[in-house]
Amino acid sequence: MNTKQKVVLIGLSGCSSTGKTTIAKLTAELVNQSTLIHEDDFYKHDDEVPIDPKRNIANWDSPEALDFPLFRKELGHIRESGDIKTELIHNNNVDDLKKFKIKPEILENLKQNYSAIDSNLKIVIVDGFMMFNDPEVRSKLDIKILIRAPYEQLKQRRAARLGYQTLDSFWVDPPYYFDEFVYKSYAETHGPLFINNDVEGHLDPVKASDIQDFMNSDEVAIEQTLQWVCNIIVNSCKDL
Ligand SMILES: Nc1ncnc2c1ncn2[C@@H]1O[C@H](COP(=O)(O)OP(=O)(O)OP(=O)(O)O)[C@@H](O)[C@H]1O
Ligand SMILES: [Mg+2]
């Protein structure tokens, strides 16, 4: 990194299946000076993931399933040095992006909008489902975006997925997994950011004053979401 360059860490967070990785990948392709990394790379090995005592299965959605000390340290290192380990830069689990059939002129237009970002800023997009609940991770992110979608749609999107590649195996959700693990953990860890702890309601303007949210529901074209994210990033970068 040259001495003039400043690192900007952008956290794209939200419950599983809100569309984070989809949005993060498309956005990273549109921003010239950007790199995309994934919190999923900080998952522990299968045999270190906590076992849920009631169901006797791995709880991939508990904070203890991730190596948070390492994640915090790595984000700190990236912030200070701009140096990102090559193993953190790779293609991550995501559905076929081509299914959205985004018109090339729309992508071109977004690229144009992103070109307004000062070239001395090195943009790092961090895609992760559990970031704003951790004070240290949160404090390291310059821009915080929470992607949302209604509960029923999240459940359907998640059910439509085959499963997840873990470090050591391939995880397939049992039928109860979304309600009892994914959404339950999201509500527990993210509830405090919302008014009355209601994760289907509004963000608390005081407790979540540093976070901006967007409803990426099935009724919202992905182009709209990309445009909203673009406006947030371009405008926030002006103030950095
Ligand atoms: N606006 C949208 N309308 C309809 N489907 C969408 C929209 N955005 C994303 N999706 C779909 O939702 C599914 C989940 O998307 P994605 O994998 O990006 O979610 P994620 O938030 O990264 O989930 P996870 O945390 O489990 O990795 C994908 O099938 C994706 O194509
Ligand atoms: Mg993802």
Image (cartoon, grey):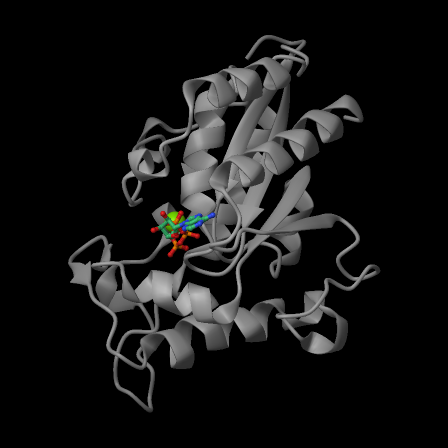
Residue furthest toward the left?
169
Drawn side of residue 197 relative to residue 109, left or right = right
Residue lying at 33% horizontally and 88% vertically, measured from the top left: 53
Above/below status of 199 relative to 31 = below
Image spot of residue 70 (x, y percent): 45, 48
Drawn side of residue 217 relative to residue 210, left or right = left
Q: In which quarter of the image is residue 55?
A: bottom left
Image spot of residue 19 (x, y percent): 45, 49
Instruction: State the quadrant of the C terminus.
Output: top right
Above/below status of 83 relative to 148 = above
Residue furthest toward the right?
206
Residue lying at 74% horizontally and 77% vertically, measured from the top left: 196
Front residue (pair 96, 55) = 96
Can residue 38 be seen in this snapshot? no
Drawn side of residue 231 relative to residue 93, left or right = right
Image spot of residue 117 (x, y percent): 66, 16
Image spot of residue 67 (x, y percent): 42, 56
Front residue (pair 187, 113) = 113
Label count reads 0
Front residue (pair 190, 69) = 190
Above/below status of 104 relative to 145 = above
Residue lying at 43% horizontally and 59% vertically, measured from the top left: 16
Instruction: State the quadrant of the N terminus.
Output: top right
Can residue 30 be seen in this snapshot? yes
Q: Quadrant of residue 60?
A: bottom left
Drawn side of residue 74 relative to residue 119, left or right = left
